[in-house]
Image (tube, rainbow, N blue to C red):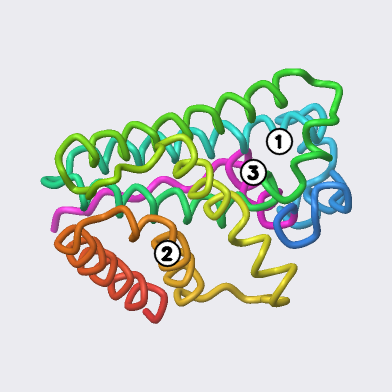
């Protein structure tokens, strides 16, 4: 009987990154020590130091993960058949990453105060890239006639949308004291940002975007329940 291909087990380095990400998200960057991360993985501090010399190296690795994931979402969205689907799928992907790596956004000032210019520069570059991608998609929506006149000032519209994307999960935690994130929170985030975008979109564009968003949200709900 032929044997199936065994899935690769995560490496110690991957386990360390996963544990650090969870602890940073829950307890905060400043309140998470190397010893606590090592304990969560079940290794000694010396073993952790072998892979990551200092805690800041872990942050660098997690920022790299975030950027890679955002790039994957963007490339996947660009392969969609319609601009409406590209926009909605990319927006949902970015929202997921803002949740998954929320400590980076929430503890931004703490992280960027580290005496390692690479972290600060990397974070600034990634935010600039995402903003430019958003501007690009909105510009193509305008060019393809998905928006009605008077046409919006794209820089102002993109800034408002990015504020929602950037701070949505922090808002839920700070304003509503949300402790456990469920699929409805991302659904609300999409609709919150659509309140900014809808006044500039034609009716058919709005209907199509909501239909696509509903498909995505239903799939996510099933995945979360399984």
Looking at the figure, which quarter contains the N terminus?
Answer: bottom left
x, y percent for residue 19: 68, 52
Are discs 2 and 3 less than 8 Å apart at CB? no
Q: Is residue 129 left or right of residue 219?
A: right
Q: Nearer the viewer, residue 127 or 202?
A: 202
Residue 222 on the magenta span: no
Q: How many marks?
A: 3
Q: Which residues are magenta?
A: 1-23
User: Quick check: 107 above or below 216?
Assistant: above
Q: CA distance from mark 2 to mark 3?
A: 36 Å
Residue drawn at x 20%, y 69% as measured from the top left = 211
Whole-percent x and y of residue 118?
70, 19
Residue that lies at the very extreme toward the front in this rendered image: 150
Instruction: Find disc 2 in the rendering and name its residue.
Output: 195
Image coords of residue 87 (percent x, y): 29, 48
Q: Give the quadrant of residue 57.
A: top right
Q: Under tag 2, what secondary structure?
A: helix
Q: Which mark is residue 17?
A: 3
Quarter placement of the C terminus: bottom left
Foreground of the two, 30 or 198: 198
Q: Is the residue 203 above or below the residue 137 in the image?
A: below
- At 64% from the left and 30% from the top, the residue drawn is 123
Q: Which residue is mark 1?
A: 59
**Which element type, helix, strand or loop, lies under badge 1?**
helix
């Amino acid at each position: 009987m032929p044997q199936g291909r065994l899935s690769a087990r995560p490496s110690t380095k991957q386990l360390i990154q996963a544990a650090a990400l969870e602890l940073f998200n829950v307890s905060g960057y400043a309140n998470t020590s190397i010893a606590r991360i090592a304990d969560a993985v079940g290794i000694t501090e010396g073993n952790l130091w072998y892979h990551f010399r200092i805690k800041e190296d872990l942050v660098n690795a997690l920022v790299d993960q975030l950027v890679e994931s955002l790039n994957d979402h963007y490339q996947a969205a660009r392969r969609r058949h319609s601009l409406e689907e590209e926009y909605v799928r990319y927006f949902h992907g970015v929202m997921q990453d803002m949740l998954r790596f929320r400590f980076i956004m929430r503890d931004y000032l703490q992280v960027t105060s580290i005496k390692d210019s690479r972290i600060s520069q990397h974070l600034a570059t990634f935010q600039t890239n995402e903003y430019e991608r958003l501007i690009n998609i909105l510009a193509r929506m305008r060019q393809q006639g998905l928006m009605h006149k008077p046409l919006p000032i794209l820089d102002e519209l993109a800034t408002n949308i990015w504020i929602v994307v950037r701070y949505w999960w922090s808002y839920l935690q700070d304003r509503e004291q949300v402790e456990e994130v469920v699929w409805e929170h991302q659904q609300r985030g999409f609709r919150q940002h659509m309140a900014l975008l809808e006044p500039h979109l034609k009716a058919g564009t709005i209907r199509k975007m909501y239909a696509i968003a509903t498909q995505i949200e239903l799939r996510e709900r099933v995945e979360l329940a399984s």
